[in-house]
Image (cartoon, rainbow, N blue to C red):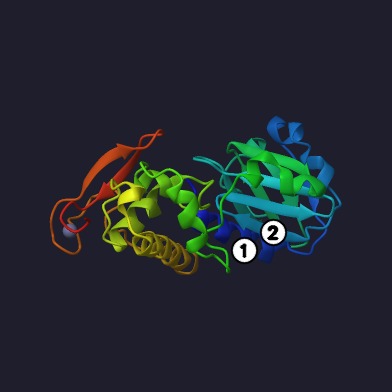
Amino acid sequence: MAEGDTILRAARRLDAALGGEIVAASAPNPRGRAAGIERLDGRRLEAVESHGKNLLLRFGDLALHSHMGMNGSWHVYARGARWRKPRRSAWAVLAGERWEAVQFGGPTLRLIPATRLTRDPQLARLGPDVLAPDFDPDAVIAPMRADPARTLGDALLDQALVAGIGNIFKSEASFAARLDPWRQIADLSDDDLRAVLRAAREQMLRAVDGGRHTYAVYKGRRPCPVCGGRIVSRGQGDANRTTYWCPRCQL
Ligand SMILES: [Zn+2]
């Protein structure tokens, strides 16, 4: 699953390639035609925004909303370059003067009238974006406390509480804050919650800028970098997403 850092990187790449340009839009795959991608043909890409795991491309009174889920992706190619996937599987092709952006798969690709963005059900329910420049952890704490019996790992994944954190940074941020992801929200102090949210933001911003990084606990392939003990894992929350943690270091 693409997490917020991947989406912010994609937004920056798309903006650098096509921002401000009039695009030629096409939809080789029927899914893209059904989404009306061709309506974007001849429009100017005015802005590219990310909010959590969601990408918004703004074209005047229309916006293209993309959520990549587990298997969606955006590729950017120099025009005429060979694609890494077959043309017929592309849902959207946005071609500018020198670059083209190509979208493949994912749960969501749709056009929304710009006037409806603020009350769109999928977008309006999102909590604050953990990667936004003005992100304030304190704005997340009270909504988290509304469900005190929930476990930390599960709450961090709830996009309505805080948008952008996925399975990797749920585990990595809990480790960085030395908090057991199975503790209930009621059992954690405001300082604890602030620490884990700040850790997630810092780790994800580093991932946006830095490319490769090694995980402390995610996937549990190496011993704990702090105590050398074994990393354990278990499915957590309604979606049973695997959480990794060090039972000695995270209390
Ligand atoms: Zn440890």
Q: Can you say whether 45 is above or below 105 in the image?
A: below
Q: Which residue is mark 2?
A: 48
Whether residues under marks 1 and 2 lie with C-beta atoms below 8 angstroms apart, the answer is yes
Q: Amino acid at mark 1?
A: Arg
Residue placed most toward the observer, 1 or 42: 1
Q: Residue at x 38, y 45 (%)?
A: 148
Q: Tell me how far mark 1 sits from mark 2, CA to CA.
A: 8 Å
Rendered image: mark on residue 99 = none
At label 1, counting other C-alpha atoms closer than 10 Å, the crowd grade (few under 14, some 14-19, many 20 or more) is some
* Ligand 1 quarter of the rendering: bottom left
Q: Is mark 1 within 8 Å of ligand 1?
A: no
Q: Is mark 2 within 8 Å of ligand 1?
A: no
Residue 10, given in percent of the width and then of the height, sits at 59, 57
Which quadrant of the view contains residue 29? top right
Q: Which residue is mark 1?
A: 12
Q: Secondary structure at mark 2?
A: strand
Q: Can you say whether 8 is above or below 209 in the image?
A: above
Q: Amino acid at mark 2?
A: Val
Q: Residue at x 28, y 58 (%)?
A: 175
Residue placed most toward the observer, 143 or 165: 143
Tell me: 197 left or right of 28. left
- Mark 1 or mark 2, earlier in chain: 1
Tell me: 47 left or right of 180. right
Residue 194, given in percent of the width and then of the height, sits at 40, 63
